C-alpha cells in the first residue's frame, strides 16, 4: 500500500479549514465576558487605590515659607515610603514631624556629614558648627525671609522626616 504524503497534507488542511472555529461554551456568553472584564478592571483599580492609600498622603501647605514652589493652602502629595523614590537627597522637599504634631515642609540643604553652605547659615550654626551631624538633615524654606527652619531650630534627625513631597497641585477655583 502506497501512502501519498502530499494529498494527505492537502486533505488535512482542507478539513481543518472547513471546521468551525473553536467556540466558547454556550453558558459563557457575551455578558459573562463583559462581567469578567469589569471584574478584572475593578480589581486592578482596587489594587492601585490600596497602593496609593498605603504609600501616599495629601498634605496641605500651611504658611508662606515654601513660596514660590508651594503656596499657602496648596495640596502636596507626600510619600511615607520615600525610599520608593530613592534616598533623601539635597534639594528634596520633605515633611518634618515636630513634637506636638506640627509639620514643617522644607527643602533639604545638607545631609549628615556635609557642611552647610554659607548662604544658609543662621544663629544655630554658631552653636552646632557648620557640619551636619550623621543621621540628621539641615532644611530651609524656599522663602528664607519667612521661614522658621534649621537656621533657627538646628538640624533635624532623620527619624523626624515623615515623608518626601513627590508632587503638588492647586485645587480648582
Image: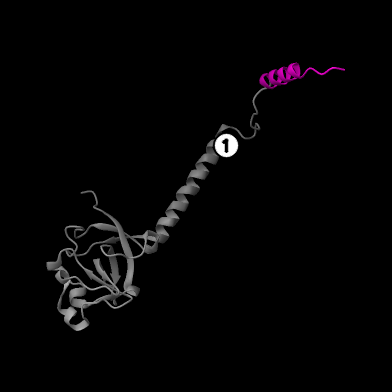
Corner quadrant of residue 154: bottom left
What residue is shown at x 19% (from left), y 60% (from top)? Answer: 72
The secondary element bearing badge 1 is classed as helix
For residue 34, side relative to residue 94 (left or right): right
Name the spot of residue 173 as percent of width and height, x first.
20, 49
Q: Residue at x 19, y 66 (%)?
A: 141
Front-lying residue, 135 or 64: 135
Where does label 1 land, which residue? Answer: 32
Total label count?
Answer: 1
Q: Position of residue 19 (x, y in %)?
A: 68, 21
Residue at x 21% of width, y 77% of height: 130
Q: Which residues are magenta?
A: 1-18
Q: Residue furthest bottom?
A: 127
Instruction: Please tell me whether residue 150 belongs to the stretch shown in magenta.
Output: no
Magenta stretch holds residue 5: yes
In the rendered view, would you say 94 is above or below 14? Answer: below
Please identify the quarter of the rendering in which residue 152 is found.
bottom left
Question: How far across and how far down the image is residue 84, in percent?
Answer: 40, 60
* Residue extending furthest toward the right: 1
The front one of 150 and 172 is 150
Q: Which quadrant does the N terminus fall into? A: top right
Which residue is depicted at the point 12% across and 67% down?
Answer: 145
Above or below, 67 against 119 in this view is: above
Q: Position of residue 157 (x, y in %)?
A: 31, 76
Q: Nearer the viewer, residue 47 or 106?
A: 106
Give the color scheme: rainbow, by chain, secondary structure or one colour. one colour
- Majority secondary structure in the magenta region: helix
Answer left or right for 80 relative to 63: right
Number of residues whose C-alpha sits closer than 10 Å to that of mark 1, classed few (under 14), some (14–19) or many (20 or more): few
Amino acid at each position: 500500500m502506497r501512502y501519498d504524503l502530499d494529498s494527505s497534507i492537502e486533505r488535512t488542511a482542507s478539513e481543518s479549514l472547513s471546521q468551525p472555529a473553536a467556540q466558547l461554551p454556550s453558558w459563557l456568553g457575551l455578558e459573562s465576558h463583559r462581567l469578567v472584564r469589569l471584574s478584572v478592571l475593578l480589581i486592578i483599580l482596587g489594587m492601585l487605590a490600596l497602593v496609593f492609600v498605603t504609600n501616599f498622603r495629601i498634605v496641605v501647605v500651611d504658611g508662606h515659607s515654601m513660596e514660590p514652589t508651594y503656596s499657602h493652602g496648596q495640596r502636596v502629595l507626600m510619600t511615607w515610603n520615600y525610599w520608593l523614590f530613592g534616598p533623601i537627597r539635597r534639594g528634596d522637599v520633605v515633611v518634618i514631624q515636630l513634637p506636638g504634631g506640627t509639620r514643617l515642609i522644607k527643602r533639604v540643604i545638607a545631609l549628615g556629614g556635609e557642611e552647610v553652605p554659607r548662604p544658609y547659615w543662621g544663629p544655630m550654626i554658631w552653636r552646632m558648627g557648620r557640619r551636619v551631624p550623621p543621621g540628621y538633615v539641615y532644611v530651609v524654606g524656599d522663602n528664607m525671609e519667612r521661614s522658621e527652619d534649621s537656621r533657627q531650630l538646628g538640624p533635624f534627625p532623620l527619624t523626624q522626616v515623615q515623608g518626601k513631597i513627590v508632587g503638588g497641585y492647586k485645587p480648582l477655583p
